[in-house]
Image: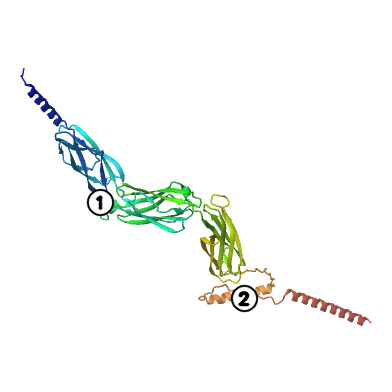
């Protein structure tokens, strides 16, 4: 038996406890996941790039600890670089730089690609963290512009940078008005990168409205734009009209760009456009205007102007006036005291056909101005329609006369045949002459049917007279 003093025994116990603690590493990784930000726009001469990040190690113990850093599950071609062993001070932290050489391969977006693992000096795993690759899209909206009409009827243009999280308009849009989206799209691959690998193909733009009732007329939700070379831009526009009957409220559109690069990686960019449609109190508009007949000519004696009005406002209009003016046609018309109910009611439309006479007007194009007033003298809508007057067309009529059949005597027919043969013989002698029509020999009949009838009557009278004379002579000789 060893004779150990109590104080010595306590010191030995403390020593072994400290040694055990130093042997078992308690280092942990501070990050919940390690993001690997990859941007292929940095590619130039090579098809791979180095991506750097930092790993934070924490040691809560009173003594320093040494750990090993390894990787697991990385895709083929991914080449990490990091210190093999790191000592973390007692009650301290250490930041470890990590670099991974990453090839041009993955689609845009986020994807787990492996783990960073720390082990103690005995090779036992202590902690691990997921590596998550976040690949930037090489197709993006460089600039987005929207042209619209606000509630005051004024034209507005809002522009946004493609890096904005979403596109929110500064003002409300007036229902029933035109809207134009303009997209400036850009290929972010460097112009010095391989032109085949960096070209974006099968570019599509998808516009998905949260409520298709926003459109006056349905529009396509997908557009194909073809291809775009490295570091080039293209502009793309979409026009549509907001529905006259669109309810007031906020509407949103999901915008999605998609394209494939030369490495078959897919690139996607998404954003959202949102705006508010509002109805105002006073909003009477011309919804249709048309002139008939079509066309109007210098021979037209009367024409019509069909006008449709509609109240899109939240207030009934009891004193609407319409004015039509066209100097060439002598039109200076005013019709007042028109009543149109508010938008939410059934009687919120007004229609009328104006009839006008047209005299002594030359061919040309003449403006017809139509102005709508509320409260009798406050202009609220206006349209100019051009009256195109054409020259009166002269119609030529072809009259077909009945054919007359003439019977030609046999002798005359023979003479006609001889004349035709003579003409043919003469023409064969002059074969170098070119004529544009056929030579026709005609025989005119010198007698008409009336002439023949008269002749027969004369012959009959003469015959009768001759017979009478002959019988008279015979009777006279017998006496």
**Quadrant (top left/top right/bottom left/bottom right) for the C terminus:** bottom right
Where residue 472 sits, quadrant-wise, is bottom right
Counting from the top left corner in percent of width and height, residue 305 is at: 58, 62
**Can you say whether 70 is above or below 187 in the image?**
above
Where residue 67 sits, quadrant-wise, is top left
**Can you say whether 187 is above or below 84 in the image?**
below
**Can you say whether 15 is above or below 468 in the image?**
above
Q: Which residue is mark 1?
A: 42
Q: Which residue is mark 2?
A: 419
269 vs 281, nearest the viewer? 281
Q: With 201 as the anchor, is 284 left or right in this view?
A: right
Coloring applied to the structure? rainbow
200 vs 124, nearest the viewer? 124
Disc 1 vs disc 2: which is toward the camera? Answer: 1
Q: Secondary structure at mark 2?
A: helix
Q: With 4 as the anchor, is 457 left or right in this view?
A: right
287 vs 375, nearest the viewer? 375
Closer to the chain start, of discs 1 and 2, is 1
Where residue 63 sits, quadrant-wise, is top left
Q: With 447 as the anchor, is 157 left or right in this view?
A: left
Q: Are marks 1 and 2 in contact (CB under 8 Å)?
A: no
Rounded to the nearest angstrom, the CA distance separating label 1 from label 2 is 98 Å
Counting from the top left corner in percent of width and height, residue 381 is at: 51, 60
């Amino acid at each position: 038996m060893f004779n150990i003093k109590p104080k010595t025994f306590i010191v030995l116990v403390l020593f072994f406890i400290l040694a055990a603690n130093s042997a078992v590493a308690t280092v942990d990784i501070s990050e919940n996941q390690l993001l690997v930000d990859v941007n292929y726009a940095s590619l130039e001469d090579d098809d791979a790039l180095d991506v750097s990040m930092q790993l934070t190690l924490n040691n809560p113990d009173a003594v320093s600890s040494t750990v090993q850093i390894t990787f697991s599950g990385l895709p083929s071609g991914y080449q990490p670089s990091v210190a093999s062993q790191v000592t973390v001070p007692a009650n301290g932290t250490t930041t470890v730089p990590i670099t991974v050489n990453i090839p041009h391969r993955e689609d845009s977006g986020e994807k787990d690609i492996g783990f960073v693992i720390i082990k103690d000096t005995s090779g036992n795993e202590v902690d691990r963290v997921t590596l998550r690759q976040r690949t930037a899209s090489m197709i993006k909206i460089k600039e987005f512009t929207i042209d619209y009409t606000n509630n005051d009827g004024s034209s507005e243009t809002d522009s946004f940078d493609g890096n904005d999280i979403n596109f929110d308009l500064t003002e409300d849009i007036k229902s029933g008005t035109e809207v134009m989206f303009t997209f400036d799209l850009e290929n972010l691959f460097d112009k010095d990168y391989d032109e085949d690998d960096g070209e974006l193909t099968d570019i599509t733009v998808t516009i998905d409205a949260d409520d298709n009732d926003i459109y006056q007329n349905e529009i396509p939700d997908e557009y194909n734009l073809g291809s775009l070379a490295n570091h080039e831009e293209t502009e793309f526009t979409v026009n549509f009209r907001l529905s006259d009957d669109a309810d007031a409220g906020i509407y949103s559109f999901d915008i999605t760009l998609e394209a494939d690069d030369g490495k078959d990686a897919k690139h996607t960019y998404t954003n959202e456009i949102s705006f508010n449609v509002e109805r105002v109190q006073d909003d009477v508009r011309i919804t249709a205007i048309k002139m008939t007949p079509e066309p109007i000519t210098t021979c037209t004696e009367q024409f019509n102007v069909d006008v449709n009005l509609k109240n899109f406002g939240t207030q009934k209009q009891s004193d609407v006036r319409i004015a039509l003016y066209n100097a060439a046609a002598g039109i200076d018309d005013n019709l007042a005291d028109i009543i149109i109910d508010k938008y939410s009611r059934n009687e919120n439309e007004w229609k009328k056909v104006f009839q006008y006479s047209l005299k002594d007007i030359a061919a040309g194009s003449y403006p017809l101005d139509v102005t709508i007033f509320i409260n009798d003298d406050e202009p609220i809508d206006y349209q100019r329609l051009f009256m195109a007057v054409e020259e009166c067309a002269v119609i030529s009529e072809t009259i077909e006369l009945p054919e007359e059949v003439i019977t030609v005597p046999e002798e005359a027919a023979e003479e006609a045949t001889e004349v035709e043969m003579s003409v043919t013989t003469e023409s064969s002698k002059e074969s170098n002459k070119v004529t544009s029509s056929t030579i026709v020999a005609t025989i005119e009949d010198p007698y008409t049917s009336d002439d023949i009838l008269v002749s027969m009557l004369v012959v009959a009278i003469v015959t009768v007279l001759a017979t009478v004379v002959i019988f008279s002579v015979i009777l006279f000789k017998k006496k």
